[in-house]
Image (cartoon, rainbow, N blue to C red):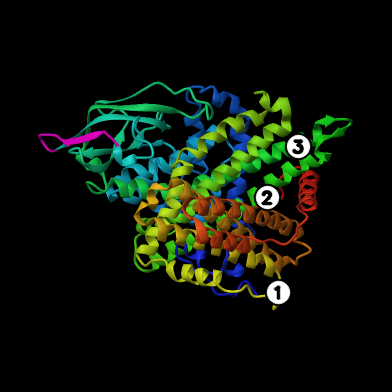
Amino acid sequence: MNTSTSPQTLFKGGEWLIKESNAFDTFTPEDFNEEQLMVKDMCLQFLSSEVLPIVDRIDKMEAGLMPSLMVKAGEQGLLGSSVPESFGGLGKDFITSTLVNEGLGGGYSFSVAIAAHTGIGTLPILYFGTEAQKQKYIPKLASGEWKGAYGLTEPNSGSDALGAKTTAVLSADGKHYILNGQKCWITNGGFADVYTVFAKIDGDKFSTFIVERGMEGFTQGPEEHKMGIKGSSTVQLYFQDCKVPVENLLGEIGKGHIIAFNILNIGRLKLCAAALGGAKMSVNDTVVYAKTREQFKTAIANFGAIKYKLAEMAIRIFASESALYRTSKWVDDKELELAAAGKPFNEALLGAAEEYAVECAILKVHGSEVLDYVVDEGVQVHGGNGFSDEYAASRGYRDSRINRIYEGTNEINRLLTVDMILKRAMKGKLDLMGPAMAVSKELMSIPEFGNDDETAFAKERKAIVNMKKSILMVAGAAVQKLMMKISDEQEILMNIADMAIETFEAESTLLRVMKLADKQGEAAAQLQIDMMRCYLNDAVDKVNKAGKEAINAFATGDEQRMMLLGLKRFTKTEPFNSKDARRRIADKMIAENKYPW
């Protein structure tokens, strides 16, 4: 099949759950163009030359060091990849800007600072600001002359962002909003020039303001002492009768939640990209160490237990990468579609990100947990040395942990994944009822035998279809049984979310491999096929386990037995020698001293 001429199918958000995807419609890292690869290489070069040699100085919070690095990044255009040229940026597409986040993701605390600046520090003004606000702030943010930060979290409102207590009252002369309150865990807060701050006008209208350093009544606390990302500035912000000019209201009064939640959709996808960059750097470091560390008169890289760890790191990275760029292309295509329909650039991207909010939540969860796995096993491979600050493994381990907390905790994102899918179904945007009823009908029928599909990857494609049936069966029955009470059954919702996450990641990996095998031939793509089969094999088991836990939590009697039998039918796998596959994957990594895909 000629992939260059096949028609593009743009799924709506969540639609992959009820439809079989076409491998030749997916976008993969092998599809990056020359310019995109150059941009990624520029990011890696910047880290290796400007950041990694001084990470110890960065972690010690050397005065002025982080802001100076951000200025250097701005000089190379790395702060404005997604900013239109009219505001001093590079005006690159969404995939390219995602690549920048991945390319800079291996810079420890620097990665956090730059991601916060280019994301939540810049995008609210770029997408929701007036023309005057954008002209005033965006060019300086894109160049790095000014640094950005974002003030949403408060001591008593983290995941419950709308529970914020910071208030804003219009002054008697109507020229200022008077802010009173406190924000905490503000990344870049110690040196930022521009802050996007959320407060409630008259105590109930959740709104957004642009606050500048030096405004009367605005102060900051000392730097927080943190477990990891020690070189990242994190402070509290205090507003005591802080006078903010009325022209610094961002967006509409009472619509602050639209800004907060839309920016978070983009931030979740970009966090996955940064986590991916960090994971690749960590696994490269671990491979090199495993080859040089000798025990029992041989390099530990020669031991099967170590090869398992190296291969599993690569497998999870490959899966996360496959899902990330599949979704990035969906967002990019949707943005172009909305722009062609006459939407301005800000509404086009925000609309595209909102369309794929489910997938952005999935990516955030999976990407952060892949990074946690990689750095944890990296410490294990390093042994006692991994516990020493003399080795990069300990810094990577500490710095990784925050990713499962910010941009919405992974628990919140799991709950959001299911909640958003169900809401789309109730609004008629996603037809879950039809496919769910078809699965229920299939459970009552006798399984078909024979007429096996002999085409390439037929068994793997069938496994994905059956994983989706498992989700529809469990989710459909849970909603029918629990009705409006389902929102109180968070354990069941997280079980269903885990089923969806594993299915989306496994399908994305399969589609990438199918496309690759079509272009290169199965022999040339053998190691990628190995990774896909290892991931799929484990994903099916995880779907089975999460499905059983959910079913046993709400079903009893004949209904329970019928569903467990159905789950067993839908999560059967063919015998597969994953040990040999992982050894082949690890041997390639050892030969090339890195993650080579």
Q: In this view, does 218 lie above or below 24?
A: above
Q: In this view, does 567 lie above or below 89?
A: below
Residue in the image at 40% along x and 40% along y: 121
What amino acid is found at the position of numbered circle 2 in the picture? Ile
Estimate the x, y position of residue 396 in percent, counting from the top left: 61, 33
For label 3, the SS is helix
Segment colored magenta? 164-174
Q: Are marks 1 and 3 in contact (CB under 8 Å)?
A: no
Residue in the image at 59% along x and 59% along y: 508
Farthest residue toward the bottom? 451
Which-is-in-front pick, marks 1 and 3?
A: 1
Q: In which quarter of the image is the N terminus?
A: bottom right
Whole-Å distance between the Cαs marked 1 and 2? 24 Å
Q: Which of 405 and 485 is in front in this view?
A: 485
Callout count: 3
Q: Which mark is residue 455?
A: 1
Q: Residue 315 carries which label?
A: 2
Q: Residue 181, can we see it?
A: yes
Q: Is residue 494 above or below residue 117?
A: below
Estimate the x, y position of residue 422 in percent, counting from the top left: 40, 59
Residue annotated with mark 3: 288
Residue in the image at 39% along x and 32% along y: 192
